[in-house]
C-alpha cells in the first residue's frame, strides 16, 4: 500500500502574479493544489509546504550578483503563502535561510516542528512512513525540479502533478525541458 505525502512548493505571494518574482499564471494552480490538499487531508496523509525564507541581502539577490530580484524575505507579505491557497493543517518546510547559500530544493530546508524543533524534510517524511511524494507548486524549472530530483535521490517514488505546477521559462521551453529531465530521472509526470 502506498504511503503518500503532498509537497506544495513555494506557492508564496512573491512567486505569484503581482509578486516580486512572479511566475506567469502561477496563481492558476491554486484551486488545483487546494483540491489535492483537501483530498490528502481527508485521507489523513501528510501535507508539507516548502517556502523560501530569505534574509535581506540574500546571495540569490541581484545586489549580491545573484540572478533574482529580492523575494520571499523573512517576515514580509511576499514570504507568505498565497491567501487563496487556504490549506488544511500542514507542515512547513523553510529553505534559503543561510544568507550566503541558495536552496532551491525543499530537501535543503527544515520542517518546523512543535517547540522550535526542526528537522530535514527527508527525516520528516521517513518518520511519517512516507514512500511516495506528490509534488505541486512553483516553479517547474527551478524549485519544483530541484525538489523532485532530490526526492528521487532520497528514494521516494515521485509524482509530478502536471496541472499543478507552473514555470518561469526564462528561456522558452525551460519548463518542458525540466519535466523531461525529471521524467528521465524516474519521476512520473501525471
Ligand atoms: Zn529564493
Image: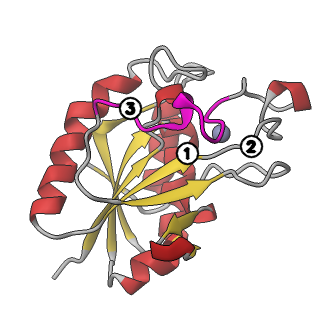
Q: Nearer the viewer, mark 1 or mark 3?
A: 3
The part of the chain drawn in magenta is: 71-84
Q: Name the residue: 45% across, 74% down.
A: 114
Residue designated by label 3: 82
Marking on residue 71: none
Nearer the N terminus, badge 1 or badge 3? Answer: 3
The answer to which quarter of the image holds residue 95 is bottom right
Look at the image and tell me whether residue 155 can be seen. no
Cα distance between the residues tagged 1 and 3: 17 Å
Is the CB–ligand 1 distance for label 1 below 8 Å?
yes
**Left or right, 104 with reference to 34:** right
Residue 91 image point, x, y percent: 39, 62
Nearer the N terminus, badge 2 or badge 1? Answer: 2
Element on which disc 3 rests:
loop
Say which quadrant the N terminus sits in: bottom left
Cα distance between the residues tagged 2 and 1: 18 Å
Q: Is residue 85 above or below residue 108?
A: above
Q: Are marks 2 and 1 in contact (CB under 8 Å)?
A: no
Q: Is residue 76 above or below residue 159?
A: above
Nearer the N terminus, badge 2 or badge 3? Answer: 2
Residue designated by label 1: 143
**Left or right, 88 with reference to 170:** left
Look at the image and tell me whether residue 17 can be seen. yes
Marking on residue 55: 2
Cα distance between the residues tagged 2 and 3: 20 Å
Element on which disc 1 rests:
helix
Residue 14 image point, x, y percent: 54, 27
Amino acid at each position: 500500500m502506498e504511503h503518500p505525502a503532498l509537497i506544495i512548493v513555494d506557492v508564496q505571494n512573491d512567486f505569484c502574479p503581482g509578486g516580486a518574482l512572479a511566475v506567469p499564471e502561477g496563481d492558476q494552480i491554486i484551486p488545483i493544489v487546494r483540491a489535492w490538499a483537501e483530498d490528502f487531508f481527508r485521507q489523513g496523509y501528510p501535507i508539507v509546504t516548502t517556502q523560501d525564507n530569505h534574509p535581506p541581502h540574500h546571495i540569490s539577490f541581484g545586489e549580491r550578483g545573484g540572478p533574482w530580484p529580492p523575494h520571499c524575505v523573512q517576515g514580509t507579505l511576499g514570504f507568505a503563502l498565497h491567501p487563496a491557497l487556504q490549506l488544511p493543517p500542514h507542515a512547513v518546510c523553510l529553505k534559503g535561510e543561510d544568507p550566503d547559500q541558495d536552496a532551491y530544493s525543499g530537501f535543503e530546508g527544515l520542517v518546523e516542528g512543535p517547540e522550535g524543533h526542526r528537522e530535514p524534510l527527508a527525516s520528516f517524511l521517513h518518520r511519517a512512513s512516507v514512500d511516495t511524494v506528490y509534488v505541486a507548486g512553483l516553479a517547474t524549472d527551478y524549485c519544483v525540479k530541484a525538489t523532485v530530483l532530490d526526492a528521487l535521490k532520497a528514494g521516494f517514488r515521485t509524482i509530478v502533478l502536471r496541472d499543478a505546477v507552473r514555470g518561469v521559462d526564462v528561456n522558452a521551453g525551460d519548463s518542458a525541458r525540466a519535466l523531461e529531465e525529471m521524467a528521465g530521472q524516474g519521476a512520473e509526470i501525471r
